[in-house]
Image (cartoon, coloured by chain):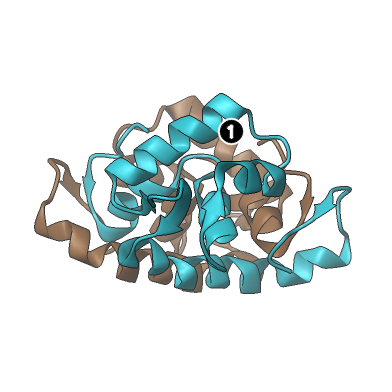
Chain colours: A brown, B cyan
Amino acid sequence: MKTYRQYCTVARGLDLIGERWVLLIIREMLDGRRRYSDLLRGLPGIATNLLAERLRTMQRDGLVECTDGGRYVLTAHGEGLRDVVDAISRWAWPLMDQPREGAPCRSQ
Amino acid sequence: MKTYRQYCTVARGLDLIGERWVLLIIREMLDGRRRYSDLLRGLPGIATNLLAERLRTMQRDGLVECTDGGRYVLTAHGEGLRDVVDAISRWAWPLMDQPREGAPCRSQ
């Protein structure tokens, strides 16, 4: 992820969560730990090497940890993104009147 | 922006606001209407053609309008993103203990 190089909380946050798929990976883990295969199933369309890359970056940034059992779990810092995910969800709710084609979201 | 093609409020929202720079453009307009040159100044690093492209897409998606005076202003729907921007800002606040080099954010 290229940093925005701005001294601003919004830009600084987006440096960590602005990359494509990151917030959907967070969404998948808000209900609990997930195996790599669970994440792949919950994120149709993501390439397996891209998921691996995102998880590495998210671990480096302290959002996600890998447990002994090979499951991914949010850190407390990652869990703090629930408010962001919820805010996006509330904002986008009216858009669902005109749903696009797609698989149902696991968290709904 | 590629759509995630998921029937999920989070994914649907990110289809509109997940592209790089979009939420920072929104941030710039939360305090009021902005000229194109104001936006360029407030978003160091954005290419002028990329800003134009983002504004076109955001107008198409109903987030932004262009006024007679050539200023850009948030629609009510775009204004609704204040909660999302605020949630990211709150989440990222602790990260500012270790600021990266960069210009101060206009909204701070």
Question: What residue appears at the point 32 percent right and 71 percent down from the top-left corner?
Answer: A90
In this image, A53 relative to B94: left or right?
left
Image coordinates for residue A23, horizontal then vertical, percent? 47, 53
Please tell me which residue is depicted at 54% across the width and 35% down the height of the picture: B51
Residue type at tag 1: Glu
Q: State whether residue A50 is above or below residue A56.
A: above
Residue B18 image point, x, y percent? 44, 46
* Image-quadrant location for residue A68: bottom right
Query: Residue A61 appears at what percent x and percent y?
Result: 71, 51
Q: How many marks?
A: 1
Classify the position of the N terminus of chain B by image quarter.
top left
Residue identifier under label 1 = A53
- Report in which chain the residue with disc 1 lies: A
- Dividing the picture into quadrants, the one containing residue B10 is bottom left
Q: Nearer the viewer, residue A37 or B85?
A: B85
Q: Residue at x 35, y 47 (%)?
A: B16
Residue at 29 percent across and 62 percent down: it is A92
Q: Is residue A19 visible?
A: yes
Foreground of the two, A67 or B60: B60
Looking at the rendered image, the quarter that the C terminus of chain B falls into is bottom right
Vertical order, B91 against A21 (above or below): below
Crowdedness near tag 1: few (<14), some (14–19) or many (≥20) residues, C-alpha within 10 Å: few
Residue A62 in view? no
Report helix, strand or loop for mark 1: helix
